[in-house]
Amino acid sequence: MRPARALIDLQALRHNYQLAREVTGAKALAVIKADAYGHGAVRCAQALEAQADGFAVACIEEALELRAAGIGAPILLLEGFFTADELPLIVEHDLWCVVHSLWQLDDIEQARLAKPINVWLKLDSGMHRVGLHPSDYKAAYQRLQACANVAKIVLMSHFSRADELGCGRSDEQLAVFQAARAELSAEVSLRNSPAVLGWPQVPSDWVRPGLMLYGSTPFEESQVLAERLQAVMTLESKVICVRELPVGEPVGYGAKFVTDRPMRIGVVAMGYADGYPRQAPTGTPVWVAGQRSRLLGRVSMDMLCIDLTDVPHAGLGSTVELWGKNILASEVAAHAETIPYQIFCNLKRVPRLYSGS
């Protein structure tokens, strides 16, 4: 059996969720959209359900998968509904719903629902993706308050640059939100993972930890709370071939690396078809036989090469960690000029093996 696999530590997942709770004192929706960022939404929800205040997903398809698996906790649809015919399903499955556009508000007012739904009213405070314009926000809240189809209302927005700790944009967005919600009496939800870890001054009755749940920092620089996160996923495989090469020999497609001394090269059963980033360059760190080494040459579809020259005790069958508790996903992402969100979500083909449940 091919040795590539992703080990998912559910105890680390619970630790990271509790950290979000601890540092904010707020209720927390665990964001498990996109199959829990590649970690497996159902298994992650099952591991967290006893302690989580609820979950957040992108769309109703993701929510229904959780309900079918027996998850009974609150589930928020972060993109709301896409057509009005989803509203009866939202009622049937007791889902919470973001409203980010006036057409959604119109549809809720016109619907005939068996019972009222909980609505999270989203403001565009400056990200300019989805959300109501500040000038429409108070009137939309008043319409929801007056609507028999609406139960509880939560006020929310989303920061665009909270992962940049020295950037003033989050303070600007907070000021827009505070002005728009003045005199509106409702709970608020503003803090995503970077805001949970790095913006303690931002008020939030509900927080929405996403990336931090999976043990990866959202910041490029060191940050004290992010240092307390525990990696949830370890992507690993084994050395399946060892080559002894003299100086001046090319390695892999395109001769992107040429040996500059006699070298031992390990071939690892892992490639971009598994989700490892193809753009990761020579020098991207790996962990083999208990020590750091590096990627060499271009990543192939099913294989990649690593440097075993200075790891003499490593060889055929040695376990290689591509990211996890020794090599952080954020470090691999930085070398590959991408973000840990993407490398987690790109995981495919490799089996996920769970522990700590």
Image: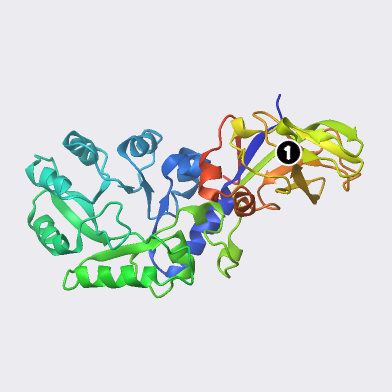
Vertical order, 102 against 252 (above or below)? below
- Using residue 300 as the reference point, say whether residue 58 is left or right of it: left
- Using residue 228 as the reference point, say whether residue 120 is left or right of it: left
Number of other residues with Cα within 10 Å of mark 1, as a class: few under 14, some 14 to 19, many 20 or more: few
**Residue type, numbered disc 1:** Lys
Applied colour scheme: rainbow
Vertical order, 14 against 227 (above or below)? above
Q: For residue 66, which quarter of the picture?
A: top left
Vertical order, 161 against 103 (above or below)? below
Residue appearing at x 85%, y 42% in the figure: 308
Residue appearing at x 61%, y 65% in the figure: 227
Q: Position of residue 247 (x, y in %)?
A: 90, 39
- Using residue 70 as the reference point, say whether residue 334 is left or right of it: right
- The residue identified by callout 1 is 256
**Nearest the camera: 1 or 242?**
242
**Nearest the camera: 337 or 343?**
337
- Using residue 94 as the reference point, say whether residue 244 is left or right of it: right
Q: For residue 176, which quarter of the picture?
A: bottom left
State which quarter of the image contains the C terminus.
top right
